Image (cartoon, grey):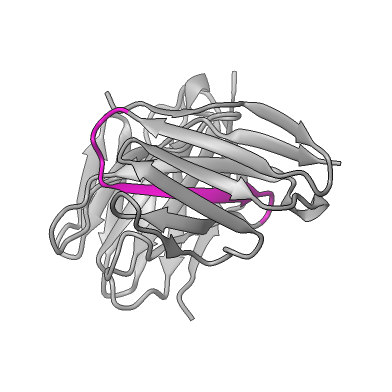
Amino acid sequence: DVKVTQSSRYLVKRTGEKVFLECVQDMDHENMFWYRQDPGLGLRLIYFSYDVKMKEKGDIPEGYSVSREKKERFSLILESASTNQTSMYLCASSLRTGSSYNSPLHFGNGTRLTVT
Amino acid sequence: KNQVEQSPQSLIILEGKNCTLQCNYTVSPFSNLRWYKQDTGRGPVSLTIMTFSENTKSNGRYTATLDADTKQSSLHITASQLSDSASYICVVSGGGSQGNLIFGKGTKLSVKP
C-alpha cells in the first residue's frame, strides 16, 4: 500500500513565523501535491510538482512556496504565517501516467495548522 | 466555469439502508471522474475512477455510475454500515495535467444504528 506521511498532525504557530510542512511518500510517485481543506470550500490546490525540482502553482499559491529536492519528499513553506492560513493541509501523491491521467491521488492524513 | 456540485450536503440514514449521492459537473474537457471517501480526521481515500467510456464501476458495496451526456454521476451505497459514516467527495479531471482536478465540496453521510 502507498503510504504518504505528513510530519505533524497538529501544529500551532504564531503570526509572522516561517512554517515548514513536510510530506514523504514511499511509492516512487512522480507527482506530489499540496492542498488545503476548509469547511464549505472543499479542497483547493496550492502547489504541485511532477518531478524533482519542478513545481507548478495551483489555484491559491499566494503566501506559500514549495521545495522538492528529492523525489519522495515535498515540503510546503509558509513564508510568514497569517491567521487566514489556519487550515487543514493535505499532501497527496500519484503516478504520472499517460494521456488518460487515471492515476488516483493517495493522501496523507493531514496537518491541522492553527496560526494565532 | 468548471464546477462540481454535490448533493445533498449531508445525509443521515439508518444502518442497513441504501443511499445514493449525486454529483453534477460542468467540467470541459472531461478526462475522468473520481469518488473519494474521507473519514473524520483522515485524508481522502480513492473509491473509484471512471473514464468517459465507463457507465458504472463497483468497489464492494459502493457502485458509481456516470452519464457523460448529462454530466452526472452518482455513488450508491448498499446495505450501509456504521463505518460508511464519512464525507464523500466527487472529483472531476479536466485533463491537461494532474493539477487540473476540480473538487466538489462533498456530502457528509452519517449512518446511525
**Residue range corresponding to the magenta coloring:** A26-40
The answer to whether any part of residue A105 appears in the image is no
In this rendering, the answer to whether B45 lies above or below A55 is above
Q: Is residue A85 toward the left or the right of residue B87 in the image?
A: right
**Which residue is at a point 74% across and 46% down the rendered structure image?**
A86
Pick whichever, B39 or B58, lies toward us.
Answer: B39
Quarter of the picture holding the C terminus of chain B: top right
* Residue B102, above or below A94: below
Residue B31 visible in rendering: yes
Residue drawn 58% across the image and 53% down it: B8
Q: Nearer the viewer, residue B39 or B79?
A: B39
Residue that appears at 77% across and 32% down: A12
Residue A50: give x, y in percent of width and height.
Answer: 30, 55
Q: Position of residue A42 (x, y in %)?
A: 58, 54
Query: Is residue B19 covered in magenta?
Result: no
Measured from the top left, where is residue A81 in percent x and y? Answer: 75, 49
Q: Nearer the viewer, residue A41 or B18?
A: A41
The residue lying furthest to the right in this view is A116
Based on the picture, tell me whether residue A27 belongs to the magenta stretch: yes
Q: Left or right? Give the position of B60 relative to B111.
A: left
Q: Residue at x 70, y 38 (%)?
A: A113
Between residue A45 and residue A23, name the one nearer to us: A23
Image location (x, y in percent) of residue A14: 83, 40
- Quick check: A43 left or right of A68? right
Q: Please say if B51 is above or below A109.
A: below
Residue B100, above or below A71: below
The image quadrant of residue A69 is top left
Count of numbered circles on the image: 0
